[in-house]
Amino acid sequence: MTEKLNRTLSGKITSNQSDKTVTVSVERRIKHPLYGKIISRTKKYRAHDEINESQIGDIVLIEECRPISKTKSWRVIKILTRGAVV
């Protein structure tokens, strides 16, 4: 039996105020359908961070999973780069 591959995205953490939850801002670049200019679109995802190790400014890899709560259906897999310590 083969394992289902889940969607993964990478983005920057914008908030970690909630317990075991982080808000990840994922930016994607698309071409405007009429004018052809490259524009960036941003979407925020709530992700589950089991051990509360992520800080604001970190670049993380998140993976889609079963719904954990009303707003969370993503999970932090690993921290790619650490943000600047303020």
Image: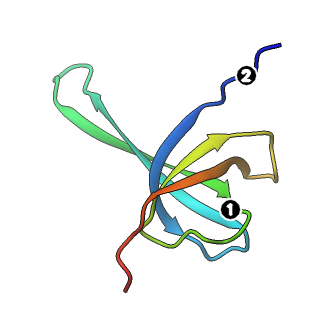
Q: Is residue 31 above or below residue 52?
A: above
- What residue type is disc 2 on? Lys
Q: Position of residue 52 (x, y in %)?
A: 67, 71
Q: Distance between the residues labelled 2 and 1?
A: 22 Å
Q: Where is residue 19 in the image (x, y as percent from the top left)?
A: 73, 74
Q: In this view, does 52 lie above or below 72?
A: below
Residue occupying the point 66% across, 25% down: 5
Badge count: 2
Determine whether the residue tagged by mark 1 lies in a helix, strand or loop. Answer: loop
Q: Is residue 51 above or below residue 29?
A: below
Residue occupying the point 71% across, 69% down: 51
Q: Is residue 21 above or below residue 6?
A: below
- Residue 49 is labelled as 1
Residue occupying the point 44% across, 64% down: 58
Q: Nearer the viewer, residue 33 or 6?
A: 6
- Residue 4 is labelled as 2
- What residue type is disc 1 on? Asp
Q: Answer left or right for 12 relative to 8.
A: left
Dot 1 alpha-carbon crowd within 10 angstroms: few under 14, some 14 to 19, many 20 or more: many
Q: In which quarter of the image is residue 40?
A: top left
Q: Answer left or right for 49 relative to 69.
A: left
Q: In which quarter of the image is the N terminus?
A: top right
Residue occupying the point 73% across, 51% down: 72
N-terminal-most mark, 2 or 1: 2
Q: Nearer the viewer, residue 12 or 38?
A: 12
Q: Answer left or right for 28 relative to 43.
A: left
Dot 2 alpha-carbon crowd within 10 angstroms: few under 14, some 14 to 19, many 20 or more: few
Q: Where is residue 64 in the image (x, y as percent from the top left)?
A: 67, 38
Determine whether the residue tagged by mark 2 lies in a helix, strand or loop. Answer: loop
Q: In which quarter of the image is the C terminus?
A: bottom left
